[in-house]
Image: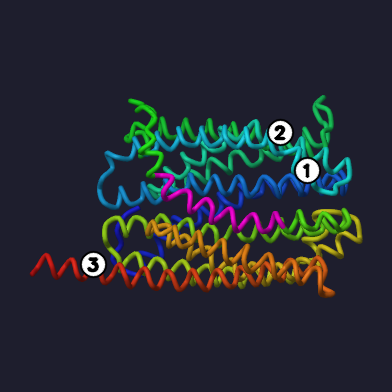
Amino acid sequence: MHETATLREKLKLFTIILVPILITQISLYLMNFFDTVMSGRVGAADLAGVAIGSSLWVPVFTGINGILLAITPIIAQLTGAKSEHEVPNKVQQGIYLAIVLALLVALAGALLLNPILQLMDLETEVRHTATFYLVSLVTGIVPLFIFNTLRCFIDALGQTRVSMLIILTSLPLNVLFNYIFIFGKLGVPAFGGVGAGIATSITYWLVCGIAFGVIYKNKPFRMYEIFSNWVKPSLKEWWEQLKIGIPIGFSIFFETSIFSAVTLLMSVYSTYTIAAHQAAMNFASLLYMIPLSVGMALTIAVGYEAGGRRLGEAKTYSYIGISGGLFIAVFAGLVLYVFNDTVAAMYNDNPEVIELTKHFIYYAIFYQLADAFGAPIQGALRGYKDVNLTLVISLVSYWGVGLPSGFLLANYTPLEPFGYWVGIIIGLSFGAACLLARLFYLQKKLAKEKKQLAIQQHG
């Protein structure tokens, strides 16, 4: 990351940062995508079991990952302020915190998984797949959370291409492991949907090991000596990260958990309906990686400029990201509309599942438009380290507006399961509008404070 003088330079640098993040996010999500698609080839019960397992895992993973994402604006602002000597300590403390959080998640899963699944009206085969898919994933969460911390450090330096190469290396291996463990190849038993969890866990260990090697041996990371002179764990340092990370994590959790809640509420419908809903949501969520990546790139760019008190440049990056996210969202909507038959057929060959999936995809077109507007704004706000109000907005818009309206539409109108998707659209649109208002207010406030400071210094 470096300073830029013109709009053209900013567009070029932002693109250089964004494209590798986008490829990385899509590749990461493709692991879940291939889990779902390849499990669906075994049968509808395996697809539904992985769907239920994913609906429980994804909000937990994304919420905790949000806490770890605090490292990105912290490092970006330090480098923007030319305080690189503080970086190793921040990263080491982030690794310690990642390990603690992973162990807490594993403990919570051991205590709560069976009670939660027993509350759901699931077929025996679906419940078995969901349970052991999650048990398999848990064996890889320590290296996953450490990798995410290391990736935040790598990305905060603007070296997003490195993260991309690490993930691109591991993705084909994940597909290979899926093939082996789901379908039973090379002498390994066929685990069905459970095999997808085993394969993904192995992949998590691989990407963590690769990240350690890259940071230890390659420039510019080795100059920071992240793995030398380890400091002791510090609750004070953890709290600094948690003050930023907890609001980010809960904000992401409130957003992703509404999709999981909808999947769980749909357990009253047929296995085919659950499978079709998950298939449509899976592909639409893959497209969501685009605006999410824009938001992550904005956190780096805005954080770097805000750290150096270059507020005009930070504001320009914000508008570049938001407008770019909207443009891409329109294109993604067209892709969903034109290729809905092809997308639906990728997940299952059952005609009823395919037809239901196509109907869900039409609603996904509209919800991803609202999401594509809100995600870049959230990324910009994180760059400013403004995260507390975003938490409140997420809670109100998703759980106070989106889920209740979806429940009413699903249960008291002819929309039935599709009513939940309309509720999601309403909640996401409300949240995006509130986030935009917050961004305008914050930028105006910071500009006023900078102007007053300049007057005092020259007065």
> x%, y% of residue 82?
25, 48
Q: How many marks?
A: 3
Q: Which residues are magenta?
A: 241-261
Q: Is residue 410 above or below residue 247?
A: below
Residue at 77% from the left image edge and 49% from the top image edge: 37
Which amino acid is tagged 1? Answer: Leu
The residue wearing badge 2 is 136
Which amino acid is tagged 3? Answer: Lys
- First in residue order: circle 1 vs circle 3: 1
Q: Is residue 364 left or right of residue 73?
A: right
Q: Nearer the viewer, mark 1 or mark 3?
A: 1
The residue wearing badge 3 is 450
Residue 176 visible in the picture: no
Q: Secondary structure at mark 2?
A: helix
Image quadrant occupied by the C terminus: bottom left
Q: Quadrant of residue 320?
A: bottom left
Q: Is residue 350 above or below residue 134?
A: below
- First in residue order: circle 2 vs circle 1: 1
Between the C-alphas of marks 1 and 3, the distance is 53 Å
- First in residue order: circle 3 vs circle 2: 2
- The 10 Å Cα crowd at callout 2, few under 14, some 14 to 19, many 20 or more, is some
The residue wearing badge 1 is 117
Colour pattern of the rendering: rainbow
Which amino acid is tagged 2? Answer: Ser
> x%, y% of residue 56?
69, 47
